[in-house]
Amino acid sequence: MESRRGPVKSAVPSNVVSPVRRCSRTACGRPAVATLTYVYADSTAVLGPLATYAEPHCYDLCAEHSERLTAPRGWEVVRLTDASAPARPSGDDLEALANAVREAARPQERAAEPGGARAADPAEVGRRGHLRVLPSPES
C-alpha cells in the first residue's frame, strides 16, 4: 500500500505476530483451547470452545487454566462442550452395536408375510430389519 510519502510500513513486523492464539493468563505462553466470557448481568462465567476470532472482552485460556477455572463468590460457571468434536461412543452404544451384529448373524426362519411380501433371496441365511446374513462363499 502506498501513500503520498511512499510505501506504508507496518508498525509491527509481520514475523513477530504469532498465528497461534495464546492463553490470556499472565506469564502463560501455552496455546489457547477455550474462551472465557463474563456475563455480568447474570453473574455468570461462560467457558466454551475457542472462539473463531479474538474478542476484546473475552479471555482465551489454555487447557490447564480452563480446567482450574473458578468464578468469584456468588457467580456460576457454565461450561459449554464443543459440539464439533467427535463424540466418543459409550459402553452402551458399543454393546448395542455388538448385540445387533450377533442377532443379525443368527439364522432365522421367517414365515412368508401375507399380502404379497417380497420373496426371500435363496442365498440368504437370515435377516434382521434391513440387514441380511449370507453364507460364506465355498472355497
Image: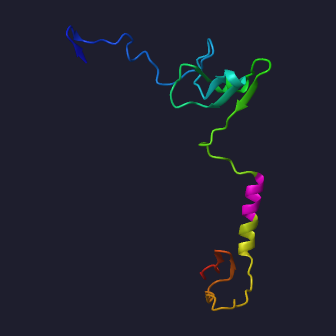
Q: Position of residue 90 (x, y in %)?
A: 74, 51
Q: Is residue 80 above or below residue 122?
A: above
User: Looking at the rendering, in which quadrant would you find the C terminus?
Assistant: bottom right
Where, by quadrant of the figure, is residue 129 drawn?
A: bottom right
Residue depicted at x 52% and y 24%: 54
Residue sitting nearer the eye, 54 or 132: 54
Residue depicted at x 62% and y 86%: 123
Q: Residue furthest front?
A: 41
Residue sitting nearer the eye, 105 or 60: 60
The total number of labels drawn is 0
User: Looking at the rendering, in which quadrant would you find the N terminus?
Assistant: top left
Q: Position of residue 96 (x, y in %)?
A: 75, 61
Q: Viewed as shown, does residue 130 lie left or right of 18?
A: right
Residue depicted at x 60% and y 29%: 33
Does residue 94 belong to the magenta stretch?
A: yes
Q: Residue furthest top?
A: 5
Main structural element of the magenta stretch: helix, strand or loop? helix
Q: Viewed as shown, does residue 74 lie left or right of 40?
A: right
Q: Position of residue 32 (x, y in %)?
A: 59, 25
Residue depicted at x 52% and y 31%: 52
Q: What's drawn in magenta, residue-wise?
A: 91-98
Q: Position of residue 109 (x, y in %)?
A: 74, 86
Q: Is residue 12 above or below residue 102?
A: above
Does residue 96 belong to the magenta stretch?
A: yes
Residue sitting nearer the eye, 55 or 19: 55
